[in-house]
Amino acid sequence: MTSGSASNPSGVQHIDVLVIDDDPFVHTGIESILSATADLRLVGSRMDGTDVMAACTQLRPDVVLIDVRMPGIDGVAAVTIAQGLPVPPQFVMMTSFDDGPRVVDAIAAGAAGFILKSDGPDAITNAIRGVSRGETALSPRSANHLADWVRAGGAGAPQERARQSIDLLSPRERDIAFALLDGSSNAEIGRRLFIADSTVKSTLQDIQLKLGARNRTEIAVLVARSGLDH
């Protein structure tokens, strides 16, 4: 979306954020975090996923932080519903440690990333900025949690099929795919592998095509599902 193109008097471009969570303390915490940034702006808060279409239409957020579990329409259903908008915002799921099944459902529905509610302010702001750039955002702790959950068999997909998919990758593609498991950004992967950020980005696009994945989160899920150590 382009609603974040509005700028403040100092010329800093805003990323407009909507929070949907049934816990008022979460709203207060997110508001406090965003108020300390120059480029992130809270444009609204809602308590229920039933408001997702109206809120997105009215407020035109760039990014929606949304709880996985809520009474009524939960986060996964809300993400699914919002895909019917002409230009859906990017969704970042806020989860707890026992939300593994719903996180995978949310990714399948179109969520761009997820963070743990216990993650710190930097993880939250980095996730918002990442998805606003079109990236898929996983905080390091949430990436490790998702990987551990999928490796434990939570996703229920055949491990052998995942391994066959990973075997399609070249050595460099494999290195980059496995680097996603700790939530590394393109820049961090580039520094680790001594390659340019642009190379990481183009290689990830190649990996997505080979694996039939829509984003880096789905790549990470497939790698974790394979059970391979690299």
Image: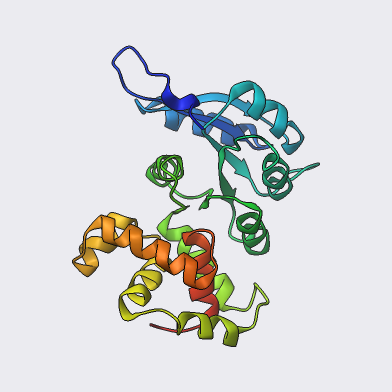
Height in image: 222 above or below 89? below
Q: Is residue 92 visible?
A: yes
The foreground one among 81 and 113 is 81
Residue 41 visible in the current orientation: no
Please indicate whether residue 95 sits to the left or right of residue 7 in the image.
right
Q: Position of residue 7 (x, y in %)?
A: 38, 18
- Residue 165, image x and y in percent? 51, 80
Q: Is residue 218 above or below residue 93?
A: below
Q: Residue at x 45, y 51 (%)?
A: 137
Q: Is residue 56 left or right of residue 35?
A: right
* Outermost residue toward the top in this view: 9
Q: Nearer the viewer, residue 144 or 195?
A: 195
Total marks shown come to 0
Q: Quadrant of residue 52?
A: top right
Measuring 27% from the left and 55% from the top, which residue is drawn there?
198
Of the 4 image quadrants, the one containing the C terminus is: bottom left
